[in-house]
Image: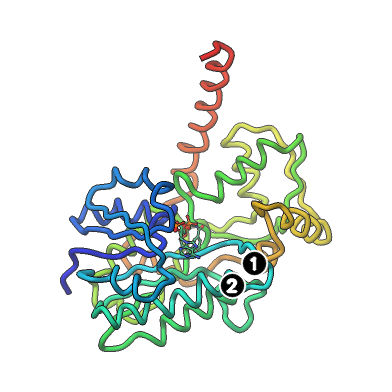
């Protein structure tokens, strides 16, 4: 299959930026739609990138976007919705997957890579996130056939520079007054490196043996959330006591923080964390990718934040 240009839906986010860079190394052009081009301008330094402001919920705009494209990679995903009834999750995960598959068919695109998540489960997922991710996964699986080759990926939490996991906890720990009550401390994760995730995507694009397959993507080791947050505090050199919150307090934190406009934590996030984010069937080795350990990557960016923070404080003192 020819692979010169791909369209990465949701490509302006954390994974998409790394993926567009990875594909550029293979001389593959990435067409990335965004709702606000101005906000994604920093991506323009990526070689072979077309950044297009458009509304991908508009079916004809989406089909037009796929003109001349050899594959579609759907990375659109949200962790929180502005409302509370699940319709935001449904729109981003389910409706958009339906539209993306229909647009592939209308535009004659024959390859579709779909980003799901560990824990995605249309029937039993406890959160809107997991239920709708599960539904979108079912849609993607059902779309696989002779006219459209589909591959699905189910990563655990993804880490790397600019991630929203370690960086978010480092930010929360920084503003915590000495003690940090941690919700769902016993939830288990197998964090996977963004470089390994993008490598898996790059390898699968043209590998026929991956057509119709689903791959869980995990790092080499499992941790509890408490272990990961303690580690974050150590790496960011923050002296905080991370206190496991009992279940009632975790729920209360979720309810209260879910009322904030930016929703730093929500009931849906809490419910997602009641299911372990690990797998016994890691797809990375099957794809020839050796999983990278948290300990070899995270210190470089959390530690450098510490150094940058010190530098900024010196600048403030010097009035510069
Ligand atoms: N990061 C993780 O730890 C992790 C773990 C498991 C699975 N995943 C999945 O991997 C995918 C990528 O994750 P990420 O961390 O890169 O996410 P991200 O940084 O939040 O980026 C997601 C992108 O999707 C677009 N988007 C969001 N809602 C949209 C909507 N309603 N309509 C159209 N576009 C929308 C946004 O583009 P614009 O704002 O530019 O339009 C955004 O840049 C997601 O599907 C996520 O569920 C991520």
- Indicate which disc residue 272 carries: 1
Q: Position of residue 136 (x, y in %)?
A: 48, 78
Q: Residue furthest left?
A: 2
Helix, strand or loop at label 2? It is: helix
Circle 2 sits on which residue?
130
Q: Residue at (31%, 54%) from the top-left corner? A: 51
Looking at the picture, tell me which residue is in the foreground, 150 or 106: 106
- Figure check: 300 above or below 143: above
- Figure check: 30 above or below 116: above
Is 97 on the left-hand or right-hand side of 204?
right
Looking at the picture, tell me which residue is in the foreground, 164 or 50: 50
Distance Cα–Cα, label 2 vs label 1: 7 Å
Callout 2 touching callout 1 (CB < 8 Å): yes
Is 313 on the left-hand or right-hand side of 184?
left
Q: Position of residue 34 (x, y in %)?
A: 40, 58
Disc nearer the start of the sequence (2/1): 2
Helix, strand or loop at label 1? It is: helix
């Amino acid at each position: 299959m020819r692979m010169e240009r791909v369209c990465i839906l949701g490509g302006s986010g954390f994974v998409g930026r790394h993926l567009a860079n990875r594909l550029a190394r293979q001389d593959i052009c990435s067409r990335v739609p965004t709702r606000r081009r101005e906000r994604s301008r920093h991506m323009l330094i990526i070689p072979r990138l077309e950044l297009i402001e458009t509304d991908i919920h508009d079916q004809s705009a989406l089909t037009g976007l796929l003109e001349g494209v050899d594959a579609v990679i759907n990375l659109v995903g949200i962790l929180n919705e502005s409302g509370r009834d699940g319709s935001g999750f449904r729109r981003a995960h389910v409706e958009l997957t339906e539209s993306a598959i229909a647009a592939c068919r209308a535009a004659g695109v024959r390859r579709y890579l779909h980003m799901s998540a560990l824990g995605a489960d249309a029937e039993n997922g406890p959160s809107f996130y997991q239920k709708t991710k599960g539904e979108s996964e079912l849609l993607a699986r059902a779309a696989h056939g002779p006219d459209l080759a589909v591959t699905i990926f189910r990563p655990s939490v993804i880490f790397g520079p600019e991630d929203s996991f370690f960086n978010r906890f480092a930010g929360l720990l920084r503003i915590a007054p000495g003690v940090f009550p941690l919700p769902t401390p016993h939830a288990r994760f197998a964090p996977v490196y963004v470089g390994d995730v993008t490598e898996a995507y790059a390898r699968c694009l043209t590998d026929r043996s991956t057509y119709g397959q689903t791959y869980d993507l995990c790092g080499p080791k499992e941790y509890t959330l408490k272990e990961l947050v303690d580690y974050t505090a150590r790496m960011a050199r923050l002296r905080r006591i991370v206190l496991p919150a009992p279940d009632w307090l975790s729920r209360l934190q979720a309810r209260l923080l879910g009322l904030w406009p930016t929703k730093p934590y929500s009931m849906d996030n809490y419910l997602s964390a009641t299911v372990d984010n690990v797998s016994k069937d890691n797809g990375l080795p099957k794809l020839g990718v050796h999983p990278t350990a948290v300990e070899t990557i995270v210190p470089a960016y959390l530690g450098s934040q510490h150094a940058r923070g010190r530098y900024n404080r010196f600048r403030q003192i010097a009035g510069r």
